[in-house]
Amino acid sequence: MNLKRKPFANISKDLVGKIIEVLFITLIFLFVLGKTTCFATNKKQTKIKIKAETINNGTGVKVTVGKTGKNGLLRFYIIGCGDAYKEYKNDDVERLLTKIETDGKKNEKYIIKGLPEGTYSFRVLFEEKVIYEYEDMGETFHSVYYAEPVYSKLKKVNISKGNDKRQEKIKYDFSSVKKGDIIKFGAYEQDDDMTNGKEAIEWIVMSKKKDKILVASKYALDCLPYNKDNQPTIWQDSSLRAWLNKEFYETAFDDKERKVIQKTRLATGGTETKDCCFLISEEDASGMEYDLLKCSPSKYARTLGTGIGYQGECSWYLRESSSFYDEVRGVSGGNSEWQIS
């Protein structure tokens, strides 16, 4: 019996020794790992301070986050919506606006333009970037992860017409401008990013008479046919004229800006119209400097289908039709020559 039990006793002792050794090593590893993890998570929690304020005459909001003092990721959220988004009105769903990597050394900001009327709340989430260093088989490795997120307090902003006193002080004084100057007036989608609102329209001053100026947009803003279904017509009856003086006019200019725009009496191909927005005539184009004949489309217009030339320019319509009413006059060009055709 003893002879049979002795080998068993020896094996058990060896196994126990190995088990103790393994447990000892494991406990050391867990202790070191646990200590490292505790070092990363038991730091003083970062406080996120934000400020939300109206901008752009009360039509947008700027959200500013104070210095975090740490590397990490900021997530900007909006809660609530305006009248333009009735399906979400008065809900409490958070929607992500953007993510910004920060080094924690400066304030970070995000601007939301062109918000419709409504009450909005903003919140920012911060996730600290943690780098964990460890060694394996004599090599040093780094692992990156983000710590538990920290939320800022909610900041509420109300967007309503005229809620910014600066709006009452807006004056459109163009008395000092001269021919060839570029002014900003009105706003229209141009960068093809619907989330950041419309962009200010740049206009080239074509002529000035006393207190009136004639301006043409610096860029091609949209892409439409002269007449729907490309049916032959004249300026007076064209769908483009109707669109310019209804949809474009109401979209690009607010109430105050529309009061500044005067109707212009136009003679085109034997007919007379009074328009707020219109295409320039062949006579106007003939008197333009060569460089002004060149026109580049906005990113939004390119998305809608404007063709572009070698240097990114596009052709554009003039007001006149041909004598047969089946062609439209315009300005086009190639690599080196632009002309009325």
Image (tube, grey):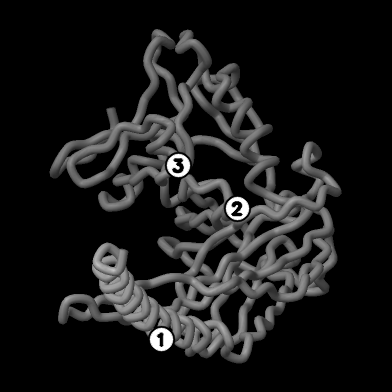
Query: In whole angstroms, how far apart are the C-alphas of marks 2 and 3?
Result: 12 Å
- Residue nearest the viewer, comparing 135 with 40: 135
Mark 1 element type? helix
152 lies left or right of 266: right
Q: Residues within 10 Å of mark 1 (few under 14, many from 20)?
A: few
Q: Position of residue 272 (x, y in %)?
A: 61, 25
Q: For the residue carrying disc 3, how many other residues have a C-alpha within 10 Å: few (<14), some (14-19), or many (20+)?
A: many
The structure residue drawn at horizontal position 15% and vertical position 81%, both measured from the top left corner, is 138
Mark 1 vs 3: CB contact within 8 A: no
Q: In the image, what residue type sits under mark 3?
A: Tyr
Query: Badge 2 is on which residue?
Result: 197
Q: Is residue 131 visible?
A: no
Left or right: where 187 falls relative to 133 = right
Q: Residue furthest front?
A: 1
- Give the Cα separation between the discs numbered 2 and 1: 52 Å
Nearest the viewer among 57 and 109 is: 109
- x, y percent for residue 158: 83, 63
Per the image, the residue denoted by label 3 is 300
Task: Say which label, 2 or 1, has the lower sequence index.
Answer: 1
